[in-house]
Amino acid sequence: MRDPESVQLAAFVARDPDDRAAFDRHMSKLRSSPDVTLHAVTLDGDLVGSIGSFVVDGDTEVTYWIDRSVWGQGVASRALAILLDTVSVRPLHARAASDNLASLKVLRKAGFTVVGVETSYANARDTEIEETILRLD
């Protein structure tokens, strides 16, 4: 979650991806929340990312992070399919930087449809960018 290219593409990340103490506090909060589902993503026994769901403003959203070394190998698609089998809440929501075409493709392949766009501040880019909003019914 500190790879500069990945951080730039994801755009909506922690203010300082190198702040380990902040990361540990955030993960501790997520693991203790009843509204959060969080799973490790592995490939051949190696940790290659995380995937989960969380509730914000009454809506359940999905999120994932996949290590760049395994991009293009279907890891995100498989992890999302497994998550969708375990999280029964519908509708589900997702968001991605509008120029993150690979992530948008993964979400659409899983059945998410675009329901809008908005401009949001992206920490990784230190500016507002367009964010695509998706929903799975």
Image (cartoon, rainbow, N blue to C red):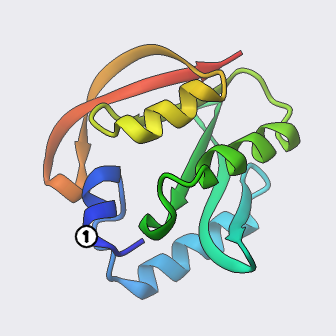
Residue 97 falls in image quadrant: top left
In the image, 69 versus 126, the foreground residue is 69
Left or right for 127, reference 5: left
Place of residue 2 in the rendered image (x, y in percent of width and height, measured from the top left): 35, 75
Left or right for 121, reference 131: left
Place of residue 32 in the rendered image (x, y in percent of width and height, measured from the top left): 74, 68
In the image, 27 versus 131, the foreground residue is 131
Place of residue 18 in the rendered image (x, y in percent of width and height, measured from the top left): 32, 82
Residue 11 visible from this viewpoint? no
Q: Name the residue under label 1.
A: 4
Task: Name the residue at 51% across, 64% down.
Answer: 70
Task: Name the residue at 79% across, 55% down.
Answer: 34
Residue furthest bottom in the image: 21
Q: What element carries label 1?
A: helix
Residue furthest left in the image: 127
Left or right for 104, reference 62: left
Instruction: Classify the position of the N terminus by image quarter.
Output: bottom left
Residue type of the residue flagged with mark 1: Pro
Instruction: Look at the picture and state if 110 lies above or below 81.
Output: above
In the image, 33 versus 53, the foreground residue is 53
Task: Name the residue at 75% across, 40% down.
Answer: 81
Instruction: Look at the picture and state if 114 lies above or below 99.
Output: above
Residue 9 visible from this viewpoint? yes
Place of residue 36 in the rendered image (x, y in percent of width and height, measured from the top left): 72, 53
Residue 33 falls in image quadrant: bottom right
Instruction: Look at the picture and state if 57 lies above or below 28.
Output: above
Number of marks in the rendered image: 1
Residue furthest front in the image: 73
Instruction: Classify the position of the C terminus by image quarter.
Output: top right
In the image, 53 versus 42, the foreground residue is 42
Residue 116 falls in image quadrant: top left
Mark 1 residue crowding within 10 angstroms, few (<14) / some (14–19) / many (20+): few
